[in-house]
Amino acid sequence: MNNSTKILSRKDFITILVVLSVIIILWRCFTLQYTESKKYSGLLENNVIKERIILTNRGSIVDRNNNILAESLQMDALIINDTEKFYKNKNNIIKMCNLLNITYKSLVKQTDGKENKKYIRIKRYLDSEVVNEIKKLNLSGLYFEKEMQRFYPEGEVLAPLIGKTNNNHEGQMGLELSFDELLSEENGIKIVKQDGNGKIVKEIRLVKQPKEGKNLELTIDIRLQYVAYRELKKQVNKVNAKAGSVVILDSINGDILAIANYPSYDPNLPGSYSDEKAKNRAIIESIEPASTIKPFVLAAGLHSKKISLFNSKYDTSAGLRVGNYSITDWKNLGDGLTAEDVVVYSSNIGSVKMAQSFDKKIYYNLLEYVGIGEKIDINFPAEQDGQLNHYSGWDKTKLATHAYGYGLKTTPLQLAKAYAVIANEGQVINPRIIKNKNFNEDKTKKYENSFNKVKDVLKKVVTKGGGRKASVEGYSVGGKTGTARAYTDGNYTKEHISIFSGMTPIEKTKLIIVVVINEPRTEQYFGSEVAAPVFKKIATDSLRILNVSPDNILDFQEKVSIEIENSKKYTFKNPEVRNVF
Amino acid sequence: MAKGIKKNLYSLIKPFFDINFFFLVITLILFGLVILTSASIELSYAEYGKAFHYTLRQIGYLIFSIFICSFFIYINSYNLKKYSILFLLFFLILLALVLVPEIGMNANGSQRWISYAGFTIQPSEFFKLFYIIWLCAYLDFKDNKLIKINNFIKPIFVFLLGAILLMLEPDFGSTVVLFAMTLSILFIAGAKFLHIISSIIFMSFPAAILVRINPERLSRFNFFEPCNAGDQGYQLCYSLKAIGSGGLWGKGLGASTAKLDYLPFPHTDFVFAILAEELGIFGVIFLIVLFYLFIRKCFYIGDRALKVGLKFQGYLSYAIGIFITMQAFLSMFINLGIAPTKGLALPLFSYGGSNYLVSILSITIIFRIYRDVYKETLNSAIR
């Protein structure tokens, strides 16, 4: 009995221990869940309730036929947030490395010493296929983070025009910069409940609705753009030039169909960028137009009635001295040059003499009318004005230089606009890069008769003058070559700028194409040799692409008949057979 | 009329089958399954793509345990006492085999499991139970002679043998439970206070040496400000955040946020934290009441056994009551940051086959003892 009571008392001792434990547990629970509850729920909420950004798309840039030139896509970045969990399954990690195109060693290197970090970004911009494959491997300790990437499907073909975005997905240069406000998206914000892996468990509330950026529709025709870029690139490399640019303008409505620049870079490859390659010379580089200005001297002269196309004759054989300058021609063109010949054979002396024969105000007004030295304002960053000084400041020398294209400056795009005025026989069109259906066309024409005549002269430049290499089979072409001295840091250098500015077809002109090749380093540097052939190739392909009907069938037929003649000569020697034709 | 039949049936069964205890156990098992489902659902979905992987496995373990116990219940407590030394040796060998590299299985840095033919068992869980059974049997043999130091030291040596094997895994938590069980049973059986206190002092030396060798163990004691203790405090930090954020009323069943891949092992070691977070202090009180009733019932059955002179059965009832409840309270202590963070299951709540089977086996033994005590009462009445 004594023994059993002893045991019972010992049982009570243990019961007391149990009760004591219960009191401790309940006391601890009460302090945690009542007194300190707010502190701990706050601590937990800091991890669980988070603000998340709702990504949305920046607007796309498309060409006139809705081909995508720049677009934003949601991509995934691979984030490791728990290295310990992650490195459990080596076989699958090696499979993952193969999918990511990285080595296991480099992966280990990336995560080495970051065991406590919750965010190690392994690789960015993964496409969804790779992501799905990796998800199938069932690895833990990692997740995918959505992010936006800007894609430029046309790459270097358009880079200097489109520009690119910076790392924050904001416009950095080119049209991406100047139309940033339109294209910009506004990311939304939401409050979410997330798990320890950063995965969203529940969306609690929306703080800000995301707003997609608007699309930008350009007048560019990517087919023409591609042709222009291809031919420009070929020629720049062939003549070992420093750079080059091409503008294709629709002379009917002013749509810029192509602006090609070379060298260029691929905005999809961050490493290929350089400031020099990003320059859109067609818009931001002012050059002296040299001989390409002569048609306007002629037009002004014709307008002044002081000059007539065939009756005004100029003697260029003796050379010309104006002030301290002596003006020369590319070769001695002799005496008796008509006004037309001055342009067709590109005589500097003739052009100066023409300009001297009428009021300089008329010439200035005409240049101003066609837009030389006036900013076009297509809304492109750092677009150049060109340069045209007021005629009141023109002395004899300056008038002379203005007559053969020096002392004034124009961008290739402005030159294209000016030539469009010739093509439209006096009607000014404003080049535009944004496709806009509500286009107010100002149909007033000035200098109509003069430009009409000049247009014919330009045709002759191509058929018998310096522009022969620009001729296009089956189409009539008008244009003017130009070769300017290159100008750097306030001094003329030994280098040249070769220009060809032309239009096709002559009647009902559709295309204005300006080709500028900067500093070709071959023996032939004349616009007629370097720039005109590029015009020919671009025009040939562009006209075919745009389905413009040939207007020079006669010329075409002549050629065909010559071919037939030749084939007769070689194949059909029998006179009877010949009669059948 | 119907009520009368029901009452008759009740009084018919009651003498050899403790219906109250049965309902208590059923409540514990069902409550455990509900909490486990809630605690494991997110983890299960993340790991297996289905919500009830752990719940279904646990139900499988339950069915398997009941199946095993339906045979085990036929071993009466006298035979259990007789063969307890064989069970002990068998599981001691298994415990040693765990340490053999080709046989034992390593996970989370501990070598605790043996995997054979698709079954994975954790011998330490079984060893704990069968060590207790052997100890009770031993004390019955050495009845009333426990005051002799020799009889006191022998079970301490057996404990040391087991403890060394456990520490090699390493399994510090089980070693502590085993040591506490040894002392508790010796205490119940009437060992001298002096012996018990001196053995505690004696055991504190190797414990101190272990801490010196591996200071990481000491850093686990940094449980006052666990959230500032870096990686070591990570688990406890989230455990406290979970319990604290629940508030007195809890977030509601299934509404835990800590289980969303923040709190590690929500389905095993930290299942209590999820319970406290979801059901608040009232859920905790309910849980404690269940375990308190459990130990009370075990003590009551133990008392009855001792009264009819069944010492082994009496000690074992006490021991099992202490065994289950102590593990439960220790697990709660760990979750609440009162004891250093050590992997320890909450019996009948935490996921895990071996622990579940051992818990059900312990309960089965209680049922068997209840029946044997009833028979003994009848026998002694006849005598």
Image (cartoon, coloured by chain):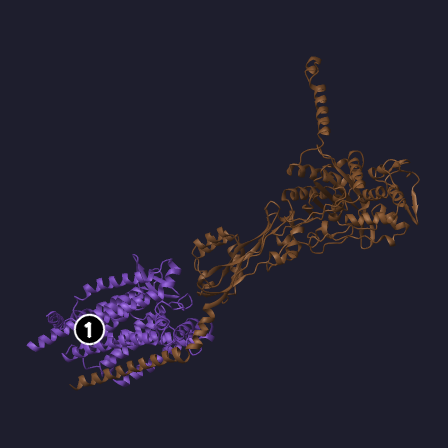
Chain colours: A brown, B purple
Q: Is residue B295 above or below residue A142?
A: below
Residue found farthest to the left = B382
Q: Is residue A151 visible?
A: yes
Q: Is residue A562 above or below residue A408?
A: above
* Residue A31 x %, y %: 39, 80
* Residue A369 x %, y %: 78, 49
Q: Where, by quadrant of the figure, is residue B64 drawn?
A: bottom left
Of A394 and A16, which appears nearest the observer? A394
Q: Residue at x 35, y 81 (%)?
A: A27
What quarter of the picture does the C terminus of chain B occupy?
bottom left
* Residue A483 x %, y %: 80, 44
* Residue A469 x %, y %: 76, 36
Query: For the residue labelled by badge 1, is the local secondary structure a helix, a strand or a loop?
Result: helix
Of B106 and A197, which appears nearest the observer? A197
Residue, disc 1: B20
Specify the subunit that label 1 lies on. B
Q: Is residue A133 above or below residue A207?
A: above
Q: Is residue B156 above or below residue A150?
A: below
Under mark 1, the amino acid is: Asn
Residue found farthest to the bottom = A2
Q: Is residue B149 left or right of residue A495?
A: left
Q: Where, by quadrant of the figure, is residue B142 drawn?
A: bottom left
Of A401 and B239, which appears nearest the observer? A401
